[in-house]
Image: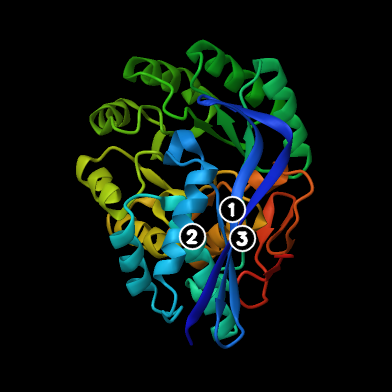
Amino acid sequence: MKITDVKVEKLQLKLDVPIKVAFGVVEYVQNLIVKIETDEGLYGIGEGAPLEFVTGETLDHVVIATRLLGRGIIGQDPLNLEKIHYIMDSTLSNNTSSKAAIDIALHDIKGKIMNAPLYKVLGGYTNKFDTDVTIGISTPEQMAKEAKERTAQGFKLLKIKAGIDPQKDIDAIKLIREAVGDNIRLRMDANQGWTVSDAVKVIKAVEKYKVEAVEQPLSHWDFEGMASVRNKADIMIMADESVFSPIDAIRIVRMKCADIINIKLMKSGGLYKAEQINAISQAANIRCMVGCMLESKIGITAAASLVAGKRNITEADMDSFLYIKDDVVDGGLKLENGTITLPEEPGLGISIDF
């Protein structure tokens, strides 16, 4: 089997409600869809979801890069993932969203060849798991109101965005805990927004509200600061923007600066290297979470398949498709009462008019 064509199209999706995080406000999604065709009639679908303040990519940049990478793999066997990633990395450094789109499409093809759903291709540990849902930055009162609404919908885990105003971050956690009660799990995500002193101040203040983890409290480059915060904290520290690659994961392990690593396919360049990050973490007794940018159900189903496939990935942040208005994707994962169930159809189990 040989790759005969790599097609690329832009996908613009409007969000139901703008999302505010420490970086800014996101009102709509600009992604790309990839379709990889083969000489035996099988094809795979993938998605790239650039987020400029995380991956450094714009949509136009990703479209150009993906077309260039696609030309370089024409004629390759789609199962030769190691060789294809070598070709892509030799052609362009970074460009992780472009590589992720191609990688996801290749894994979709692999599932179809194996006649198995992607979560089984990736390990098959389970076919369902709980996901958190994100509460964006607003007034503490509004955040508490939204938190209560989400728990009423069945979500058992809340991810609270923070990182702009430390005192308001503390106030929001207090009100949210009062609103949802003691049985709902809470995590915080500062998106690199705090200093070391801010991080320690907030973490110490929210310990009594049973916050179980704080994600990326400091700038992505500040590994030493993360280690310092972790040494002072009784709450688990999660690395997100600090970990793009397996090399970054090794650095986290060596410097002892995180208890959990958040893997995102758009950071790692797809499932192939995401599996490597998880393997390094598991060997070091560090658990993983898989998170998302602002993918449609294509990228989210791929990421969710990784969560379901691996025992060491115990946490999930798979909620971005909930915010997309009029998603054009048929099939893929299902979400009910905060629990994601993976499809049993081969590959991603997704169809789209392409």
Provide the residue designation for mark 2.
Answer: 67
User: Could you tell which of marks 1 and 3 lies nearer the N-terminus?
Assistant: 1
The amino acid on which the numbered mark 1 sits, given as a three-letter code, is Leu
Q: Nearer the viewer, residue 215 or 75?
A: 75
Secondary-structure class at tag 2: helix
Q: Nearer the viewer, residue 99 or 208?
A: 99
List x then y, in percent, for residue 329. Answer: 73, 59
- Closest to the observer, 241 or 334: 241
Seen as rendered, the residue at the extreme top is 167
Position of the C terminus, as image quadrant, is: bottom right
| Label of residue 62 in the image | none
Whether pointer 1 and pointer 3 mark residues with C-beta atoms closer than 8 Å, the reply is: no
Q: Residue 272 falls in which quadrant of the image?
A: bottom left
Cα separation between marks 1 and 3: 15 Å
Residue contact at pointers 1 and 2, CB within 8 angstroms: no
Mark 1 or 2, which is nearer the eye?
Answer: 2
Q: Which residue does the numbered mark 1 point to in the structure image?
A: 32
Is label 1 in a helix, a strand or a loop?
Answer: strand
Q: Residue at x 65, y 19 (%)?
A: 138
Point 24% across, 50% down: residue: 250
Amino acid type for the residue under numbered disc 2: Arg
- Of the two numbered discs 1 and 3 in the rendering, the one whose residue sits closer to the viewer: 1
Residue drawn at (69%, 64%), measured in percent from left and top? Answer: 332
Mark with earlier residue (3, 2)? 2
| x then y, percent, for residue 239 | 38, 40
Give the residue type that dot 3 points to: Thr
**Disc 3: which residue:** 301
How many other residues sit within 10 Å of disc 3, few (<14), some (14-19) or many (≥20)? many
Label 1, label 2: how far apart the Cα atoms are: 11 Å
